[in-house]
Structure formats: C-alpha cells, structure tokens
C-alpha cells in the first residue's frame, strides 16, 4: 500500500481551479519531488494534500485512509508534517521553543525528540536559546524542518525548502533531507532546483497547468530529453 | 529640601502610581491585539467592571480585611479577578467570536468593542448608579508620612497604603506574566500564536484555548489595575474615559504585541504625564536668592495645566505614530 496516494485531484482557491486532475503516489521511505514551471500548481498540490485548501474532486489517501479535506491539525496527529515555504518559523521564540511548539500535541517531556532533531541539525544546538528570527536563512530552514519533525511524522511535506538559500546551504539542506529520509521518513517536496532535487528523488512528478505531464523515477526524468528541454533548461 | 520632597511626592510617587496602572492595562490591550489582531476599546471598561465587582463584594463582606490589616477590597480582589476573567471570556464568546467566525476585517471587531464599551458602561450605571464610590467601606485609608531626618526638610514624604500595594501588585503581575510566557506550555503557545497564527494552527495548538486564556489574563489584570486605581482615588462608572487613551498610548509606545514593551510604555506615558503637569517653578525656588534684585522667578511653570493632563498621552500617541509607528520595541502597526 502506498504511503501517500492522490488520484485525480482537482481544487484551488475559491471558485478558481488550479489543480485539474493531479495523480501522485509515493511509497513509504521514498522521496517524491514535484517540479514544473511557475503557476503549474506545485505548491497548491502540497497545500491540497495538507488540507489547507478545498479539494473539489478526487481523493487523497494516507496509508489507505481517506484524508481528502481533513483539517491540518488532524493530519499532524495522523503522522504528517508540513514545512511551508514562507513564514515557517516563530521568529520571536527561541530555537528550542520553536521545536517544542512542533511537539505541542505530544506528551511531555520532549527531551528525546529534541535530542533527535539536534542530532539531525547539529548547528542548531548552540543556537537553542537564541530567537529563531535572528538565525541565517539556512538555519531558519533547519528550524522549520526540525519543528515539523518533532511529531515524528511518517510523511514530511516540504514547500521549496531551498528557496532563497545560497548554493552552499542548498547542498546542506539536500544532504539533511536525504538523512531524514534514510531515518525512515517519507518525503514529498516541491523544488525549483529541479535537477538537484530529481537527483535525490525516487519519484518525480512534472506538473504543468495543474496536471501531470511526466511521472517517473527521478533518474529517468533527468535522462528524458523532452523533460530536459522543456523543464530543466536544456 | 522641601522642594525635593515636593518633587518626590508629586512626580516619583504619583508617576509610579499612574505608570503601574497604565502598564497593567496596556499589557491586556497588547495581549489581546497580539492574539486576535484588533484594538480592544472596551478594555478600560473591563477595568471599571472589575473594580465594581470588588465594590459589590466589599459591600457584602466589609469586615474581611480588618483581621489581617489590609483593605477588604484587596482581600476580595482575587475573587473579582476570577469573575472578570469569566465575563471577559463570555463577552468574547457572545460578541467577538461570531464576528471572527465570519472572518470580518479587524475594524469590525474594533467597532464591536466600542459597542461592548457602551453596553458595559450602561450595565454598570444600571446596577451601581452614576455617582462616585469609595472602596473603603468599613475602614479608613492608611496614609504614611515619612519624616526626613535633618533640619532642612520640614515636610514629610506622603505615601498611601493603596499606592504601596499597587506597586507590589504590579511587580508581582509582571513577574508572574514573564514566568507564564517563557516557562509554561500555554504561555509559549500564546507567543507562538502571536508570532505566526497559521503555523501555530498546523502545529496542533488549540487556538480557542489560547484565545480564552488571553481573555482571562487581560480580564484579571484589568481588574487589578481598576481596583488599585479606585482604592487610590475613587471609583466612577466613567473611569474608563480617563484610562483608554493613556493605555492605548502606552501599548503603542511600547510596540503593540510586546508585553514588556507595554510595561515600558506604561511608565513612559505615566511619567510624561506627571512631569508635564509638575510645577517646575517649585524646584527653582531655592535659586531665587542668587538672582539680582528685581528679578522674579515665575510662581507657576508647567508644560500643561493639570486639567489638560489627558492631552499628554495624546501628544505622545501622535508623535510615536508619526516618527516610530512600531513603538520602542518594534511591535506591529495598528
């Protein structure tokens, strides 16, 4: 049974449809990457999965259970984590408080969960008492990912985790994502850096105009001349 | 020396008193804004309401304070704080929550709170009449006169019992609030929701609980401030008109959404007021002898007359909105 299975998803904001039938499935422990041009509905698809906008048609299942239009806080309890692209931290809270907020629904103490996140993101350890808003872009992204990992999700959704980061931090974030995945967390992310992202992807989904254009393994998509020409800049 | 005593009595003591009251009110305004994103104009009336709850309780049990040597009103204040906290949550459920559920613009909530202001003032008048009341029913207000040693000062420093209590209550409230916001799970959730409500929601924080707790804290602090002010001066149904402007000025000066900023703002506004109405000519009097004959110092030298005290927070408010709209602590812009 797939970890996440979305079929023929339609939806958008208000009456305006952005998704016109997206299919998408990943198995447990896989990395899925959604790429495509601007306005293709990549982030919208992620939000639709996480219950942040109304799905008007189609179905989304998590481990076989129907989660179409289920509220985000329920999904967190069901083992899903979400890292938004922007405004993904609590800037005036310290790094540790940010992580604690991630585990708000978990029984305390959170020591073990905190240790686990600090193990994944060692740079955060010495910043734990500092307000998260004072950190660099890369470290903020670590806080955002760490916050979402505090509930020990089986599936982590990430909206452009490397947006606005320097190439150095970008590589670091990709390395962390692979580590998180190796620890048994399924990952579905939207990425602008399509080449690099597809390089670590088990499954790749190329969206255009709210529909699947290509669906294959990351490697096959990278090698596909047509994908390369139209979506990866040659 | 007498001049210095005069300065202490009229600026240090009374400035600290009004600053503490403004600070406690402004904390409530700023907390409500940071969680629900609207300026709660009925806040000053929650202060009056809380004080009237205390009045009612004191009329029922006028003697409870005698045994411990504190004003009965102070002993009964915690009960009134709980009552006002409940009323504050009730007001939110009855008037603000339906508006929030309709996703209205913040200005609609502000107008709603104006309606609540009028309603509360009407209710208070309905049950308690329109006159001024004293919270001292069975006791007298203790006044302490501290005589200074030495020949020079012939006048004492005068400080009243409620003024001392007020100061310690403010310190206690600030310490408790700091502990709550930085150590407790709910307090941290409150700061998280103030920072980023959407992320708080997807983290599984129950926003309704946070909102209820915010109203409880705001209501309890408002009661404390209103009661202590009424103990110090007098309780009137329209007390709020003299509190609303300084409290909002304090919250904005401190930076809206910053509880610590609200405290600082309360002290800025409170001391600005007292310094502005203080008669500085008194401090110049000792230098009269040094002046050549025929030069007279003015007998009255203040920035504004006492009756225009309320203009001071108004000017501060305008100045801060023009030159630093985010306030001293970089808050949100109303």
Image (cartoon, rainbow, N blue to C red):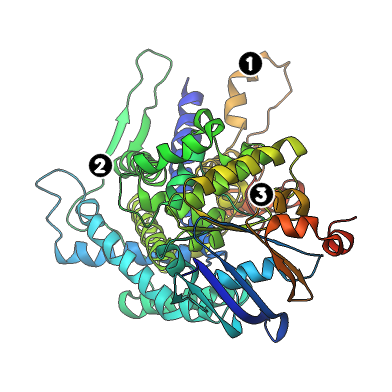
- Specify few, some or many for label 1: CA neighbours under 10 Å numbering under 14, 14-19, or 20 or more: few
Q: Which residue is mark 2?
A: B142
- Give the x, y percent position of residue A89: 57, 49
Q: CA distance from mark 3 to mark 1?
A: 88 Å
Up the image or down, A81 lies above or below A163; here it is below
Q: Decide if residue B57 is on the left or right side of residue A42.
A: left
Based on the displayed image, in which of its 4 quarters is residue B286 positioned? Answer: top right
Front position in the image: B40 or B287: B40
CB of mark 1 within 8 Å of CB of mark 2?
no
Do circles 2 and 3 both sit on a common chain?
no
Q: Which residue is mark 3?
A: A200
Q: Decide if residue B135 is on the left or right side of residue B35.
A: left
Q: Which residue is mark 1?
A: B289
Q: Which residue is found at the position 74% from the left and 76% from the top? A: A210
Q: Nearer the viewer, mark 2 or mark 3?
A: 3
Up the image or down, A137 lies above or below B208; here it is above
Disc 1 is attached to a residue of which chain?
B
Front position in the image: B213 or A47: A47
- Specify few, some or many for label 2: CA neighbours under 10 Å numbering under 14, 14-19, or 20 or more: few
Q: Is residue A3 visible?
A: yes
Q: Which residue is found at the position 66% from the left and 52% from the top? A: B317
Up the image or down, B121 lies above or below A103; here it is below
Secondary structure state at the residue bearing disc 1: helix
Q: Which residue is found at the position 42% from the left and 52% from the top? A: A152
Secondary structure state at the residue bearing disc 3: helix
């Amino acid at each position: 049974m797939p970890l996440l299975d979305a079929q023929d998803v339609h939806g958008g904001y208000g009456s305006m449809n952005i998704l016109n039938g997206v299919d998408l499935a990943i198995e447990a422990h896989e990395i899925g990457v959604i790429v495509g041009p601007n306005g293709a509905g990549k982030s919208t698809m992620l939000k639709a999965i996480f219950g942040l906008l109304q799905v008007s048609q189609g179905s989304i299942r998590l481990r076989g259970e129907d989660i179409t239009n289920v509220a985000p806080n329920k999904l967190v309890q069901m083992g899903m984590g979400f890292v938004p692209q922007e405004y993904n931290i609590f800037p005036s809270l310290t790094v540790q408080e940010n992580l604690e907020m991630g585990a708000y629904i978990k029984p305390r103490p959170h020591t073990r969960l905190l240790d686990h996140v600090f193990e994944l993101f060692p740079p955060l350890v010495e910043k734990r008492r500092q307000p998260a808003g004072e950190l660099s872009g890369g470290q903020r992204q670590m806080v955002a990912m760490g916050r979402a990992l505090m509930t020990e999700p089986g599936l982590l959704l990430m909206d452009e985790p490397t947006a606005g980061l320097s190439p150095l931090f970008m590589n670091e974030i990709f390395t962390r994502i692979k580590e998180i995945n190796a620890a048994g967390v399924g990952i579905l992310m939207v990425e602008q850096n399509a080449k690099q992202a597809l390089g670590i992807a088990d499954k790749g989904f190329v969206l255009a105009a709210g529909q699947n254009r290509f669906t294959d393994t990351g490697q096959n998509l990278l090698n596909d001349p047509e994908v390369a020409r139209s979506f990866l800049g040659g | 020396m007498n001049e210095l005593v005069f300065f202490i009595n009229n600026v240090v003591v009374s400035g600290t008193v009004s600053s503490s009251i403004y600070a406690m009110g402004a904390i409530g305004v700023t907390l409500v804004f940071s969680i629900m994103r609207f300026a709660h104009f009925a806040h000053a009336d929650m202060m009056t309401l809380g004080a009237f709850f205390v009045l009612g309780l004191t009329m029922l049990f006028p003697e409870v304070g005698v045994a411990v040597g504190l004003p009965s009103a102070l002993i009964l204040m915690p009960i009134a704080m709980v009552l006002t906290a409940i009323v504050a949550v009730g007001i939110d459920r009855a008037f603000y929550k339906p508006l929030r559920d309709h996703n209205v613009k913040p200005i609609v909530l502000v107008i709603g709170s104006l309606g609540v202001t009028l309603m509360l003032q009407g209710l208070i008048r309905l049950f308690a009449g329109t006159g001024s009341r004293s919270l001292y029913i069975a006791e007298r207000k203790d006044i302490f006169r501290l005589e200074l040693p030495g020949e020079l000062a012939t006048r004492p420093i005068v400080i009243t019992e409620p003024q001392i209590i007020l100061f310690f209550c403010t310190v206690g409230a600030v310490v408790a609030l700091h502990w709550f916001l930085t150590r407790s799970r709910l307090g941290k959730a409150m700061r998280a929701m103030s920072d980023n409500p959407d992320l708080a929601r997807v983290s599984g924080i129950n926003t309704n609980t946070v909102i209820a707790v915010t109203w409880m804290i705001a209501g309890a602090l408002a009661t404390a401030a209103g009661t202590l002010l009424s103990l110090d001066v007098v309780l009137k149904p329209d007390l709020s008109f003299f509190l609303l402007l300084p409290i909002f000025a304090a919250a904005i000066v401190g930076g809206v959404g910053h509880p610590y900023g609200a405290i600082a703002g309360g002290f800025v506004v409170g001391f600005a007021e007292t310094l502005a109405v203080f008669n500085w000519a008194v401090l110049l009097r000792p230098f009269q002898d040094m002046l050549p004959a025929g030069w007279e110092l003015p007998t009255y030298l203040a920035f504004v007359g006492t009756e225009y005290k309320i203009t001071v927070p108004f000017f501060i408010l305008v100045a801060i909105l023009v030159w630093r709209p985010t306030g001293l602590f970089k808050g949100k812009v109303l």
